[in-house]
Image (cartoon, helix red, strand yellow):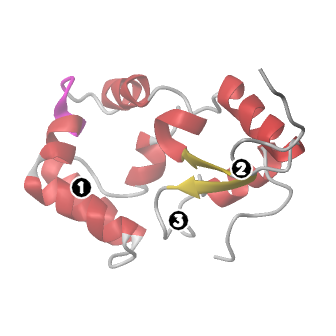
Amino acid sequence: MVTTSKPRFSGLILDFFGVLTANMVEVISFFEDRERLSRGTFLRGWADPKGQELFQRLELGLISQADWNIGCAELIGIAPENLMARYLHDAFPAYPVLAVARQARAAGIRKDLRGHLKWADCPLCPSKFLARLVWSRPLCAW
């Protein structure tokens, strides 16, 4: 086996929710418990064609976080105020994955984040979250 000091790959793409954060199924279960929703309520709303459209439009930057909050709240029957932050409340860092991202950075491998394009109005903006934990600067100039 031949080894080289040059990394085999030049980039690493990471997703935010459920990859750089705690398990998304557990996070959603904790949210449903706090909101006194039946288990599966949020995921049924997410899987609904209207829910899928809301997430797609949010990720494409076609609607605001506030618009997503209102639309998703209607689907699952709860108040829209600060809904995204409420549902991501327990999305704690996945430290083993963050360690890999730090190792990639130290090896000179470029990193990027897959996820919502318009997070500026969410208190859990991954750019801010990850800049402290992995990246030396925010990922984007929101």
Residue 68: percent from left, percent from top? 31, 64
Residue at 49%, 41% in the rendered image: 17
Answer few, some or many: residues within 10 Å of disc 3's Cα (few below 14, many 20 plus, some between 14 and 19): some
- Cβ atoms under marks 3 and 2 closer than 8 Å: no
Q: Identify the magenta region.
A: 38-42
Residue pictured at 77% horizontal, 54% vertical: 131
- Secondary structure found at label 2: helix
- Observer-nearest of 86 and 118: 118
Choose between 60 and 26: the one closer to the eye.
60
User: Is 51 left, or right, of 140 in this rendering?
Assistant: left
Q: Quadrant of the N terminus?
A: top right
Question: Of the residues shown, which amino acid type is indicated by label 1?
Answer: Cys
Question: Closer to the N terminus: mark 3 or mark 2?
Answer: 3
Q: Could you tell me if residue 77 is visible in this image?
A: no
Q: Is residue 40 left or right of residue 15?
A: left
Q: Is residue 91 left or right of residue 54?
A: right
Dot 2 amino acid type: Leu
Q: Label 3 sits on what residue type?
A: Trp
5 is higher (above) or lower (below) than 50:
above
- Nearer the observer: mark 3 or 1; the answer is 3
How far apart are the two marked residues, 2 and 1, measured between alpha carbons?
26 Å
Quadrant hosting residue 100: top right
Viewer-side label of 2, 1: 2
Q: Please name the predominant secondary structure of the magenta segment in the image.
A: loop
In the image, is 138 to the left or to the right of 92?
A: right
Mark closest to the chain's N terminus, 2 or 1:
1
Q: Where is mark 1, residue-wise? A: 72
Mark linked to residue 119: 3
Q: Is residue 40 magenta?
A: yes
- For marks 3 and 2, give the CA distance: 13 Å
| Residues at marks 3 and 1, CA–CA distance in whole angstroms | 16 Å
Which of the pair 37/13 is nearer the observer? 13
